[in-house]
Image: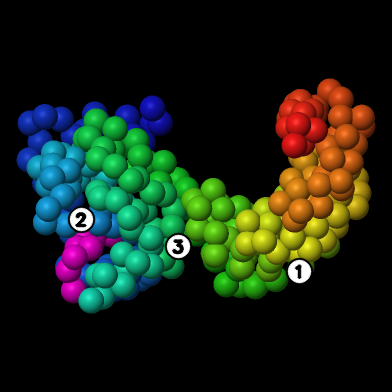
């Protein structure tokens, strides 16, 4: 437990008259307030039929500790079966299950996501984690506003959005980083290209993925991520239908990096390929 959260839990006891979360009326208004005040946004996606959504209102959102911590955010509810604008927002943020709670930066990028009911005992910890992450995201966003060619900020924000499974936004930022990262650390440059290659391979753009991985492999100095890059290259070849090249790449991992955990995966892949 961090000191800030411990102090909040201490100050807000069971006899407190502090109310729960105070909600803005509309999403766009909430974003305006967030940008003006420099706060992240807490968005509760709900529907009338969603029993757990109503349970959140009765328990988690009514909790005084949650209400106090929510003052660090701009909070707004979005009815996924409501007005046209609300439906657009639900589509924009890929809301498929209810309840879903999103934490957004003041610029609207996803910071944290909860796709289930969460009780008042755990929610303050989630809120604190989201707040800490939002502060980092804000630093990266501000850096990119000042300098769109800031490869370090683009990489950091792109990797964060990758982890959040916001792949389209992630790809744009990682491509931006790759275009300007000549002076960045080699590991970061390789990671940028690996993530971009994975996106290209999933989209069946195998030649583009191959080019990105080979570029990453050529960067000096080499590092412990070389086996992982080779494994991704081999998998890309196999998805591409180039089985022989895939096998040769897996054999190279086993031969050149026998102590790497990736070598075992390469051996297992070779066994599967030999059985076909």
What segment carries the magenta color? Answer: 74-83
**Disc 1 on helix, strand or loop?**
loop
**13 w.r.t. 165: above or below:** above
Name the spot of residue 216 as percent of width and height, x first.
83, 53
221 or 52, nearer to the observer: 52
Assess disc 2: are there few (<14), some (14-19) or many (≥20) residues with their C-alpha within 10 Å of its C-alpha. many
The residue that appears at 29% across and 57% down in the rendered structure is 43
Crowding near the residue tagged with mark 1, few <14, some 14–19, many ≥20 C-alpha atoms within 10 Å: few
Residue occupied by mark 2: 46
Label count reads: 3
Gap in angstroms between the C-alphas marked 3 and 1: 22 Å
Query: Mark 2 or mark 1: which is in front?
Result: 2
First-in-chain label (3 vs 1): 3
Task: Kindly indicate whether the residue at mark 1 contacts the one at mark 3 (C-beta within 8 angstroms).
Answer: no
Would residue 169 be counted in the magenta stretch?
Answer: no
Percent from the top left, x then y, of residue 128? 37, 41
Residue 81 inside the magenta-drawn segment: yes
Residue most toward the top?
A: 259
Please name the residue that numbered disc 1 is placed on. Answer: 179
């Amino acid at each position: 437990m961090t000191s800030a959260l411990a102090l909040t839990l201490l100050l807000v006891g069971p006899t407190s008259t502090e109310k729960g979360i105070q909600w803005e009326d509309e999403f766009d208004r909430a974003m305006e307030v967030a940008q003006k005040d420099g706060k992240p946004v807490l968005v509760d996606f709900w529907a009338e039929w969603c029993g757990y959504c109503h349970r959140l209102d009765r328990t988690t959102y009514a909790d005084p500790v949650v209400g106090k911590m929510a003052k660090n955010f701009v909070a707004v509810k979005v009815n996924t079966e409501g007005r046209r604008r609300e439906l657009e927002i639900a589509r924009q943020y890929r809301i498929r299950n209810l309840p879903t709670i999103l934490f957004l930066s003041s610029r609207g990028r996803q910071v944290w996501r909860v796709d289930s009911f969460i009780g008042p005992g755990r929610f303050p910890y989630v809120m604190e984690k989201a707040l800490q992450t939002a502060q980092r995201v804000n630093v990266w966003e501000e850096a990119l506003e000042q300098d769109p060619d800031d490869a370090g900020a683009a990489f950091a924000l792109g990797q964060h959005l990758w982890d959040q499974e916001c792949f389209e936004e992630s790809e744009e930022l990682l491509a931006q980083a790759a275009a300007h990262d000549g002076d960045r650390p080699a590991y970061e440059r390789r990671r940028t290209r690996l993530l971009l290659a994975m996106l290209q391979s999933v989209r069946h753009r195998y030649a583009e993925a191959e080019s990105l991985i080979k570029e990453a492999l050529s960067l000096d100095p080499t590092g412990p991520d070389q086996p992982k890059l080779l494994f991704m290259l081999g998998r890309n070849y196999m998805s591409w239908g180039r089985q022989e090249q895939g096998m040769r790449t897996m054999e190279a991992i086993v031969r050149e990096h026998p102590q790497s955990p990736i070598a075992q995966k390469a051996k297992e892949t070779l066994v599967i390929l030999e059985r076909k």
